[in-house]
Amino acid sequence: MKKNKIHIIATGGTIDSKFYAPTESSLVKQESGIPSFLDMIIKPHFYFSFDQHIMVDSNDITNQVRDSLIEKIKNSPSDKILITHGTNTLTQTLHYFTEKLTNTPKTIFLTGSMIPMDGFCPTDGGFNLGFAIANLIHYPAGVYIAMNGAVFADGDVKKNFDIARFEYIKS
C-alpha cells in the first residue's frame, strides 16, 4: 500500500495556543506542537512534512498572509495540504482560497480547535487534526474545512460562536 504524503502548514490559532478564553484573542505559542503530536502516532499510513508559516491569532490573518499561504500551497510538492488555523476567521480563509485556487489539482483542508491541544483537557484539537488527515487523504481536489466531525465546503459553513461549533448553513 502506498503511503500518502501530507504537507502540514501551521498558522497558529487556538490549536497552538497556551491561553484560552472564548471571547478573547489567543496567546499563540512561538513554536507549533503539531509535529510532536503527530510523532506520537505509531506507524501511521501517511508521511508528513511540516512548515510553521506564521504563529498568530486568526484575527491577525490578512489577505496578504493568505496570499503567502497560497504560494506555499502552489510550491508544495505534495498534492495533500493541511493548514492549521484559528477558528475566528477560518471561514473567511476557506472562501478566499476557494476563489483564488479554482481548478486546483490539490486537496486542501483547513482545521483548528476551540480549545488548545497542549495542556488542556478536554480539547477538540487532536480529534479535529486526525479527522482532517483521515478525510484529506480521500477527498477530491478542492478546499475544505474539517471541524467537529464534519467536512464543509465554501458557502456551506458558519461558526456558531454561541455553542463553539462549526455548522452547516441551513438553506
Image (cartoon, rainbow, N blue to C red):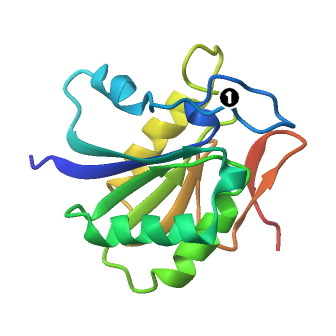
Q: Residue at x 72, y 53 (%)?
A: 59
Relative to residue 101, is residue 35 drawn left or right?
Answer: left
Quadrant for the C terminus in the image: bottom right
Give above or below for 119 relative to 55: above
Which residue sits furthest left? 1
Please state the horizontal and vertical placement of residue 41, each as a whole percent of the image.
30, 23
Relative to residue 109, is residue 72 drawn left or right?
Answer: left
Query: Is residue 149 visible in the rendered structure shown here?
Result: yes
Relative to residue 157, is residue 152 drawn left or right?
Answer: left
Q: How many marks?
A: 1
Q: Residue at x 82, y 34 (%)?
A: 22
Residue position marked by numbered label 1 in the rendering: 115
The local secondary structure at tag 1 comes to loop
Please state the horizontal and vertical placement of residue 80, each as a whole percent of the image.
31, 59
Based on the displayed image, in which of its 4 quarters is residue 25 positioned? top right
Q: Residue at x 82, y 67 (%)?
A: 170
Q: Nearer the viewer, residue 94 or 28?
A: 28
Q: Amino acid at mark 1?
A: Ile
